[in-house]
């Protein structure tokens, strides 16, 4: 049932940009390069691409269809399509919980990016010790806390205002600029002397490096980067009108998302090798390597400044989709007023984000399986919650909601891409066992 007050995207392009805005974010520019660096480079890139196309695309189609069919938040969507008195809505509830968890630490990292805007404006690009600057920043308390708060306040502000107009307009201008800036960075990075080793590392796969962990990290990254497994695309799909085509829209979102991630890797790895840094430096990789690339460029300070502005904006267009999942749930299912929901949830998310923020200072003694608190949040969200959410969504699509009905929903409207029987095969027979086995083995290996 469609309530009269529910917003709708005002154009097909508006939806694509908002969904691409959700997909393109810290996951592409911050997370993808460092996870690739921890998993042997090119081999990870290859498996990640396979995971995005064979697992990500069908799940993306399914989530958008679930949203459009029901015009509901994730919990409401599963309730609307499942038979009464079945517990499928719990998959939506897991998604809401996951969105909440991811946003809490996503905002901390976006806060680092905001702090780097100010640092760039103050001329830090001229300094030589970028690793030192990064460590000093994250092991502080006041500054990271301030920026975490500012970032959450911006996210709450946009979501309170309603999701459509502001975002649609802003994303249309900013995404192309981000793209161009990345191209400039790639150019500088690959022309540094000694960059060749980085290109080999990033583009020539070494198959001996594959482990269950590599596969699981690739699936996790595919879900994270496409905003899947937690209902964000269900929620955005719920604002989609009936004559938009899902197959094409999802294709654009995926294409743009993958392109930005590949470019981010091309900007980072050649520079990592040229500058004698280590590709497996972890979450600091982007924040340490890219300033070093800017330092090697004419007008580096200006480019550095611009880059962190755009990275922050890319983070905002993703964080709003994370918050929107939780807000849409409270508004639809518990009749909260939108503004109140955004503010209250925003405050709780801010507080839940404080432990990972302090994991580099006051709480640095707290470790889980050798990971700090932020990595622990990230591990639970990405290695467990998102794959489980995606797995259950695929099972739901394949065995509860009839796949013929989903295909009707996907292929509705004029489209270039026509989705056929391969979708049924993937969603029913390949995706669920693939995720289950890989996740099980990787978790087993983590603990044993
Ligand atoms: N896709 C975003 C990124 O790559 O940064 C992160 C994200 C947004 C994950 C929304 C999940 C989500 F629902």
Image (cartoon, rainbow, N blue to C red):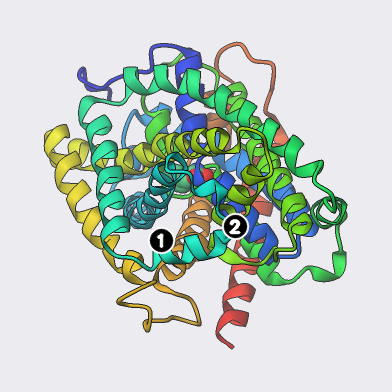
The residue singled out by tag 1 in the image is 137
Residue 166 left/right relative to 173? left
Residue 198: give x, y in percent of width and height. 81, 54
The Cα atoms of the two marked residues, 1 and 2, are separated by 15 Å
Nearest-to-viewer mark from 1 and 2: 2
Q: Residue sitting at 49 percent across and 55 percent down?
A: 392
Disc 2 crowd rating (10 Å Cα; few below 14, some 14-19, many 20+) is few
- Vertically, is 261 above or below 139? above
Q: Secondary structure at mark 2?
A: loop
Which label sits on residue 128? 2
Mark 1 and mark 2 lie on one chain; the one further toward the N terminus is 2
Locate residue 4: give its quadrant. top left
Q: Residue at the spot x=49%, y=49% of the render?
A: 124
Q: Which residue is located at x 43 percent, y 39 percent?
A: 121
The vertical placement of 72 against 395, above or below, is above
Q: Secondary structure at mark 1?
A: helix
Q: Relative to 434, does residue 265 appear above or below in the rendering?
A: above
- In x, y percent, where is residue 41? 76, 59
Whether residue 336 is visible to the viewer of this picture, yes or no, is no
Image quarter hosting the C terminus: bottom right
């Amino acid at each position: 049932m469609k309530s009269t007050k529910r917003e709708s995207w005002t154009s097909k392009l508006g939806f694509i940009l908002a969904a691409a805005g959700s997909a393109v974010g810290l996951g592409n520019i911050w997370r993808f390069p460092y996870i690739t660096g921890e998993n042997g480079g090119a081999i990870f890139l290859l498996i990640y691409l396979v995971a995005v196309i064979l697992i990500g695309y069908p799940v993306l189609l399914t989530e958008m269809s679930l949203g459009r069919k029901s015009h509901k938040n994730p919990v409401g969507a599963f309730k609307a399509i499942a038979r009464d008195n079945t517990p499928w809505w719990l998959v939506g509830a897991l998604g809401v919980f996951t969105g909440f968890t991811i946003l809490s630490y996503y905002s901390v990292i976006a806060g680092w990016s905001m702090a780097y805007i100010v640092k760039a404006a103050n001329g830090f690009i001229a300094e030589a010790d970028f690793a030192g600057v990064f460590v000093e920043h994250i092991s502080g308390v006041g500054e990271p806390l301030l920026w975490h708060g500012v970032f959450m306040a911006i996210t709450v502000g946009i979501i309170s205002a309603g999701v459509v107009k502001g975002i649609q307009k802003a994303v249309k201008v900013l995404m192309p600029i981000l793209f161009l800036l990345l191209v400039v960075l790639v150019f500088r990075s690959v022309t540094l002397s000694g960059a060749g080793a980085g290109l080999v590392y990033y583009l020539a796969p070494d198959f001996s490096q594959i482990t269950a962990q590599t596969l699981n990290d690739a699936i996790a990254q595919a879900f994270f980067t496409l905003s899947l497994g937690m209902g964000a695309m269900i929620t955005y799909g719920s604002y989609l009108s009936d004559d938009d085509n899902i197959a094409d829209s999802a294709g654009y979102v995926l294409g743009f998302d993958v392109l930005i991630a590949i470019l981010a890797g091309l900007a980072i790895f050649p520079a990592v090798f040229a500058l004698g840094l280590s590709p497996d430096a972890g979450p600091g990789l982007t924040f340490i390597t890219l300033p070093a690339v800017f330092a090697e460029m004419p007008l580096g300070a200006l480019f550095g400044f611009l880059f962190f502005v755009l990275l922050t904006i890319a983070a905002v267009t993703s964080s709003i989709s994370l918050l929107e999942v939780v807000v849409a749930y409270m508004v639809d299912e518990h009749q909260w007023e939108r503004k109140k929901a955004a503010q209250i949830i925003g405050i709780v998310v801010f507080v839940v984000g404080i432990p990972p923020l302090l994991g580099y200072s006051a709480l640095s003694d707290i470790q889980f399986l050798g990971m700090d608190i932020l990595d622990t949040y990230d591990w639970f969200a990405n290695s467990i919650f998102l794959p489980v959410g995606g797995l259950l969504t695929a099972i739901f699509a394949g065995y509860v909601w009839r796949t013929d009905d989903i295909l009707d929903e996907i292929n509705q409207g004029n489209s270039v891409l026509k989705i056929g029987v391969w979708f049924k095969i993937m969603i029913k027979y390949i995706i669920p066992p693939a995720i289950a086995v890989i996740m099980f083995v990787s978790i087993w290996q983590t603990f044993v």
